[in-house]
Image (cartoon, grey):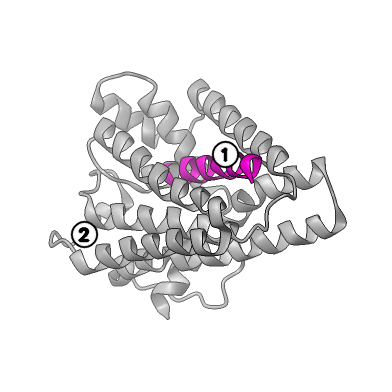
């Protein structure tokens, strides 16, 4: 259970019942990231159903919008904003990597955060309480499973925390497990949510496409790129859910 609790401490703001840490189990920790997504998705779904029962409108949409961010301590949004500053600077690669590690917030990060917030909030306003919400459980699972597979499979940036002590041998079975979890999450989305399952698929696909694009731009994989992929993928998932709800 140590890798799971490591993932809990690292990727979730809910107090963890165990504080054990073993640096040698970092890869196993990443495999547990979809499990953290399941916890976040279940809480997200539960709050959505509570607000639906109370018929809380505008404020409800705002709260539902920010719940996944709050439950991760804004960690993935931090990566999203760092990547926005780095990639949109259009500097040479060395300078982009330097910007990625810069703790200061630039204008591109602010602009992209505003765009992400507007689209996420507007999509939840569109959805309202017209959906069963079941796919919300699997959206964070799919995004994190894809992200974990990418961190495990791609070579890390030299400045990434995952570069330290990294085994050069590719853990293929771990990547396959994470990819399989993403596929299962997408399948369950369609089985339990019907057309709304497109939101889970969008979460997985958009997370992957974002990571591939940013990784190609920066020349390697990092936690920031992982967070950027998760943030973008989940925003796209909510947009897809709004579109699906419109046709339901």
Figure disc tally = 2
Q: What segment is highlighted magenta in the picture? A: 229-248
Q: Nearer the viewer, residue 104 or 228?
A: 228
Q: Is residue 42 left or right of 112 when viewed as pictured?
A: right
Residue at horizontal 43 percent and vertical 41 percent from the top: 228
Residue matched to label 2: 166
Residue matched to label 1: 239
Q: Report whether residue 224 is seen.
A: no
Residue 23 image point, x, y percent: 32, 68
Q: Is residue 104 left or right of 115 when viewed as pictured?
A: left
Report which quarter residue 221 is drawn in: top left
Q: Report whether residue 133 is seen.
A: yes
- Say which element carries label 1: helix
Q: Which mark is residue 23?
A: none
- In the image, residue 27 sits, relative to residue 94, either above or below, namely below
Q: Is residue 90 magenta?
A: no
């Amino acid at each position: 259970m140590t890798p799971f609790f490591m993932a809990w401490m690292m990727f979730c703001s809910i107090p963890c019942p165990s504080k054990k840490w073993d640096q040698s189990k970092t890869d196993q920790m990443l495999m547990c990231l979809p499990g953290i997504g399941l916890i976040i998705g279940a809480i997200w779904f539960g709050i959505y159903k509570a607000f639906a029962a109370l018929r809380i409108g505008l404020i409800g949409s705002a709260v539902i919008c920010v719940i996944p961010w709050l439950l991760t301590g804004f960690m993935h949004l931090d990566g999203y904003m760092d990547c926005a500053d780095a990639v949109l600077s259009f500097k040479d690669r060395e300078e982009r990597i330097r910007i990625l590690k810069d703790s200061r917030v630039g204008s591109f990060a602010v602009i992209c955060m505003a765009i992400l917030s507007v689209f996420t909030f507007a999509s939840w306003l569109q959805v309202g309480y017209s959906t069963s919400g079941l796919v919300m459980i699997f959206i964070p699972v799919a995004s994190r499973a894809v992200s974990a597979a990418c961190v495990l499979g791609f070579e890390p940036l030299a400045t990434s925390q995952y570069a330290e002590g990294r085994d050069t041998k590719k853990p293929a079975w771990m990547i396959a497990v994470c990819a399989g979890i993403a596929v299962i999450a997408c399948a369950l989305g369609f089985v339990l949510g019907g057309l709304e399952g497109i939101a889970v698929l969008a979460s997985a696909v958009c997370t992957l496409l974002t990571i591939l694009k940013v990784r190609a731009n920066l020349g390697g994989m990092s936690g920031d790129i992982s967070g950027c992929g998760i943030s973008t993928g989940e925003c796209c998932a909510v947009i897809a859910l709004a579109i699906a709800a419109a046709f339901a």
